[in-house]
Image (cartoon, rainbow, N blue to C red):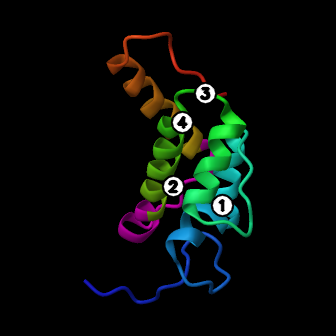
Amino acid sequence: MTLESYACEFCGQGVEESVNHLFLHCPFAQQCWGMINLIVSDNAGIAENCAAFKIQLNSQFFMVAFILMAWTIWKARNDIIFNNNQMGLQDCRIHFLKEVKLVGLRVKVKPITFI
């Protein structure tokens, strides 16, 4: 499969969709992280931001939040490309919380809360 363009589908600014842009630096991604009170560092990559998220969340489940939000952003991106359906922030929030609840069913500790 060949994509027509390598530009970010979210921001429409013609920015090439790299891993760092898609998951961290795109304004849409930053708003998604903001929904769970995480601030993305503009000059840092995935590893650095992941370490910062650990400090910001101060939770043993920080990696769960990181993975599930990245998954939510990825699903929203694919929904645009493959279904021509733009998920809004509220849709992403609902998807994220649904995934958190599913993880919570598998964990035998207190329920996970991020918001």
Q: Which residue is mark 3?
A: 59
Q: Secondary structure at mark 2?
A: helix
Helix, strand or loop for the magenta stretch, by majority:
helix
Tell me whether the residue at label 2 lies in contact with that at label 1, contact meaning CB atoms closer than 8 angstroms: yes
Q: Residue 10: which quarter of the image?
A: bottom right
Quadrant housing the C terminus: top right
Q: Earlier in the sequence, mark 3 or mark 2?
A: 3
Q: How far apart in space, not on screen, are marks 1 and 3 (Cα)?
A: 24 Å
Q: Position of residue 8 (x, y in %)?
A: 56, 77
Q: Earlier in the sequence, mark 2 or mark 1?
A: 1
Residue nearest the viewer, comparing 87 with 24: 24
Q: How far apart in space, not on screen, are marks 2 and 1 (Cα)?
A: 9 Å
Q: Report crowding for label 2: few under 14, some 14 to 19, many 20 or more residues within 10 A (C-alpha).
A: many
Q: How far apart in space, not on screen, are marks 3 and 4 (Cα)?
A: 21 Å
The disc at residue 28 is: 1
Type of residue at label 1?
Phe
Identify the magenta region: 78-90
Q: Earlier in the sequence, mark 1 or mark 4?
A: 1
The disc at residue 94 is: 4
Q: Which residue is mark 2?
A: 73
Quadrant housing the N terminus: bottom left
Indicate whether residue 85 is drawn in magenta.
Answer: yes
Type of residue at label 3?
Ser
Q: Earlier in the sequence, mark 3 or mark 4?
A: 3
Q: Secondary structure at mark 4?
A: helix
